[in-house]
Amino acid sequence: MVRKVVLLKGDGIGPEITSSVQQIFSEAAVPIEWVEGKGGLGAFEETGNPLPEETINLIKEHKIALKGPLTTPVGTGFRSANVTLRQILDLYSNVRPVLSLPGINSPYKDVNLVTFRENTQGLYIGQERIVEPDSHIELIGVITRKASERIVRAAFEYAHKYDMKKVTLGHKANILKESTGLFLRVGKEVSADYPGIEFQDMIIDNMAMQLVMRPQQFEVIVTTNLFGDIMSDLASGLVGGLGVTPGANIGDEYAVFEAVHGSAPDIAGQNKANPTALLFSSLMMLRHLGMDDKYTLIRAALVKALANNEVRTADLGGNGSTKGFTDAICKEIRNA
């Protein structure tokens, strides 16, 4: 059965890397029909809204989307369409697998972990209050039992499904005793429902150090919104950066899979963009949809292409281009 998926091509290099995914999916005969939506800076310039209502309605109708990078102005301008999308659709789980890959120059060769970041609360609710203009700003963060329980449970369910043995919860309950203290208490309660999975809690600054020193000790990490934003990027740096790291935002009804890197407007249209992160995200989407055979086929082709220095893109130390890398993956699929 053909599955309709909303496609947001995004800004900058977004159209190039989404086109790469479309070409590869076509080569692999993935039964997906793309339904295009608008989002980001391009949508704002066209419609005055970085996340038009029609795009939100498309995702609500089809339940799933693949999203290229969306540009968000820094310090001024409109609010992040990414954050808005997560909140409107209640995409409470931000999931990022982090895996060492062949051919990638990275500090470690044996990392295999996944970060779960609570996606709807914390400091990212955007409640800022100006006490004195340009002098004194206050911001509010929110942590609730409901949000804490569902993100921790999602982490444990993932560990159970993929036979991972350990969940580590990151917090700052030594200082933020009530807020992240609640997150920690709920984590301990939820862990009791999964006796076969080891539970560990770790103060977040210590976790940052431990990730750099010995990342192999981690399997599943779960933490709050701001901490998770930082830790997931840090973890990505262990295996080659955001250019090879997939991401997903998953709720009870909807799921949006995305490239977690920026829109790189400085190289847009130059056939230099690396589609790896978005392609890995699209593979997460295939597994989410139960298309395991297509997931296995495309992933094997991607890993082989990454190991080939002549087709790997320049940001990964190779001599290839967007088109050359994409064509190489398609060739591997044909030869499988």
Image (cartoon, helix red, strand yellow):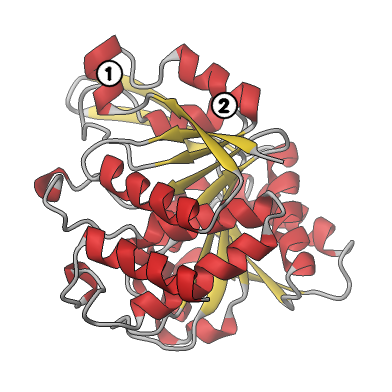
Residue 78 image position (x, y, % from top left): 28, 22
Q: Is residue 166 left or right of residue 137?
A: right
Which of 316/240 is in front? 316
Q: Which residue is mark 1?
A: 44
Residue 100 image position (x, y, % from top left): 44, 80
Instruction: Say if 304 sits above or below 53 in the image.
Output: below
Work out whether mark 1 precedes mark 2 in sequence or the reverse, and give the earlier one: 1
Residue 325 image position (x, y, % from top left): 28, 66
Residue 60 appears in the rendering: yes
Residue 41 image position (x, y, % from top left): 25, 27
Few, some or many residues within 10 Å of mark 1 (<14, 14–19, 20+): some
Which of 161/269 is in front? 269
Quarter holding residue 329: bottom left
Residue visible at 22% across and 56% down in the picture: 273
Quarter holding residue 220: bottom right
Residue 229: mark in rendering: none
Instruction: Say if 332 sits above or below 108 in the image.
Output: above
Mark 1 against mark 2, which lies toward the viewer?
2
Secondary structure of residue under mark 1: helix
Which of 143/59 is in front? 59
**Amino acid identity at mark 2:** Ile
Residue visible at 54% across and 49% down in the picture: 248
**Amino acid identity at mark 1:** Phe
Looking at the image, do the residues carrying marks 1 and 2 touch, with CB atoms under 8 Å apart? no
Few, some or many residues within 10 Å of mark 2 (<14, 14–19, 20+): many
Quarter holding the N terminus?
A: top right
Residue visible at 71% across and 76% down in the picture: 166
Residue 59: mark in rendering: 2
Secondary structure of residue under mark 2: helix
